[in-house]
Image: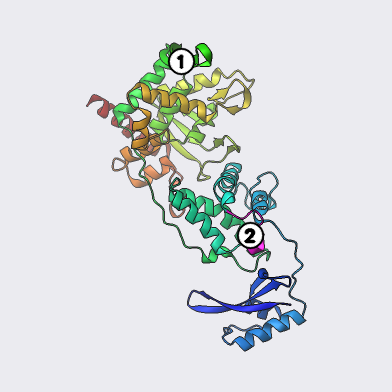
């Protein structure tokens, strides 16, 4: 067998590695592994480092003689391996992980990783690169290319790297590769862009517009087919029902996430008194994964004005599907709610109608999820951290056991603060 030794520096010392090469092409490495790992495999248990080259050669020769070096392994194309790894319906890794820890990997997460790899990593990797040939240089070339292009944030590039690092970690665990190439890749720092928030006045205007649009109707400019296959804008009376209004109100008054809102059923709503109801937020929905648990996999309770609770229940009663209790129901499906794009399209039209242009929206970095950030920001300082975390659903691991058992009285007290907040800001 053809091989040579190299030294790699890790942490506080250097390690000997042996590199077995293709007899027909000495530049092609078939296997690279730690000499100290080979020492353990031949039955020598010692915690002392291998520091002498002569000792390293002796260990390698012994491993060869004992038949521990197998260069006739099946080669796996790296891109094919990663694509199969993140295929939610076929991945052995995902299936096994979800068996050991149910719902630990959702379809939406797997598809996000798959999309990141296909769109941003695969085009920057050699097409014939095999799994055991991947080095830190290949990963860093992807990173450097994306950084130089300047189109993606560091956070997105980190997700691209994650789409490769998780499969490589599993390949290392299964001994398909001798060492993890990610060990030599430099960490990328996040470049966080502060998400903007709305004023209470803006939220009231958005809600007023969507309510009128859902009941009486509003006139909007819609693109229609004109002469010679052109598109022209013409005024059109639009009345859409109350779903976009109710979704926006829930996000503004409770801080619920979009997926939690669309998954809402009338069973989750309890009318408490003449002023408030309480919603148990225990599920969410995703366009890919369907219904799932909430982001933190914990149930929380949020307060909401009784008038809005009654509108939500009334919307559920209009569900055309037999036995359906879903509030944001879709006529096309008895199991799936309206799409997130349906809510977003009407929400962004409302922004434009109250004077927030698309250019201004992007400059302020505001979107539908910013309603949740606005809710969180406005309540901070008005209620204690315990209540805020419990209602918003931002419990840390350390606090989750202590703060997930809020009483109805605690929740209703938060509801009173929210109600006063919107009243006072509107009166100003």
Image quarter for residue 209? top left
Where is residue 165? Give x, y as percent.
57, 57
Query: What's drawn in magenta, residue-wise?
Result: 125-133
* Number of the label disc, if any, that sits on residue 170: 2
Image quarter for residue 394? top left
Residue 334 in view, yes or no: yes
Q: Is residue 38 within the magenta segment?
A: no
* Number of the label disc, if any, that sits on residue 82: none
Farthest residue, direction left? 428
Q: Main secondary structure of the magenta part?
A: loop
Distance from label 2 to label 1 (Cα)? 54 Å
Q: Is residue 176 left or right of residue 11?
A: right
**Of callouts 2 and 1, which one flags the residue occurring earlier in the amino acid sequence?**
2
Quarter occupied by the C terminus: top left
Where is residue 279? Give x, y as percent.
47, 32
- Find disc 1 in the rendering and name its residue: 232
Where is residue 85? Give x, y as percent.
65, 51
Q: Is residue 318 left or right of residue 83?
A: left
């Amino acid at each position: 067998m053809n091989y040579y030794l190299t030294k790699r520096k890790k942490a506080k010392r250097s390690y000997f590695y042996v590199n077995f090469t293709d007899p027909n092409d000495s530049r092609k490495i078939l296997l690279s592994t730690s000499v100290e790992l080979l020492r353990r495999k031949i039955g020598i248990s010692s915690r002392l480092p291998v520091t002498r080259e002569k000792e390293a050669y002796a260990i390698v020769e012994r491993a060869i003689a004992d038949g521990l070096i197998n260069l006739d392994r099946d080669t796996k194309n790296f891109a094919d391996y990663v694509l199969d790894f993140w295929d939610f319906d076929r991945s052995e890794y995902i299936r096994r992980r979800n068996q050991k820890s149910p719902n630990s990997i959702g379809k939406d997460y797997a598809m996000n990783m798959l999309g990141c790899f296909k769109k941003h990593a695969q085009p920057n990797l050699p097409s014939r690169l095999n799994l055991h040939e991947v080095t830190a240089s290949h990963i860093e070339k992807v990173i450097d290319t994306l950084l130089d292009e300047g189109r993606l944030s560091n956070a997105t590039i980190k997700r691209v790297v994650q789409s490769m690092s998780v499969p490589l970690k599993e390949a290392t665990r299964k001994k398909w590769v001798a060492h993890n190439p990610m060990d030599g890749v430099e960490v990328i720092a996040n470049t966080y862009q502060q998400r903007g928030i709305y004023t209470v006045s803006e939220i009231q205007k958005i809600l007023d517009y969507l309510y009128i649009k859902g009941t009486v109707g509003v006139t909007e400019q819609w693109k229609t087919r004109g002469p010679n296959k052109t598109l022209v804008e013409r005024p059109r009376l639009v009345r859409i029902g109350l779903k976009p209004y109710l979704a926006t109100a829930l996000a503004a008054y409770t801080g619920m996430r979009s997926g939690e809102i669309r998954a809402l059923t009338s069973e989750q709503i309890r009318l408490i008194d003449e002023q408030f109801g309480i919603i148990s937020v225990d599920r969410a929905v995703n366009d890919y994964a369907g219904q799932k648990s909430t982001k933190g996999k914990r149930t929380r309770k949020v307060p909401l004005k009784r008038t809005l609770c009654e509108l939500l229940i009334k919307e559920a009663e209009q569900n055309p599907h037999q036995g359906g209790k879903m509030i944001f129901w879709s006529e096309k499906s008895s199991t799936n709610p309206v799409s997130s794009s349906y809510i977003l399209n009407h929400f962004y039209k409302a922004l434009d109608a109250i004077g927030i242009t698309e250019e201004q929206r992007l400059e302020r970095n505001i979107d539908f999820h910013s309603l949740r950030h606005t809710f969180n920001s406005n309540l901070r300082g008005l209620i204690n951290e315990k209540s805020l975390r419990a209602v918003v659903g931002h419990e840390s691991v350390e606090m989750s056991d202590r703060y997930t058992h809020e009483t109805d009285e605690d929740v209703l007290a938060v509801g009173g603060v929210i109600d006063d907040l919107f009243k006072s800001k509107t009166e100003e």
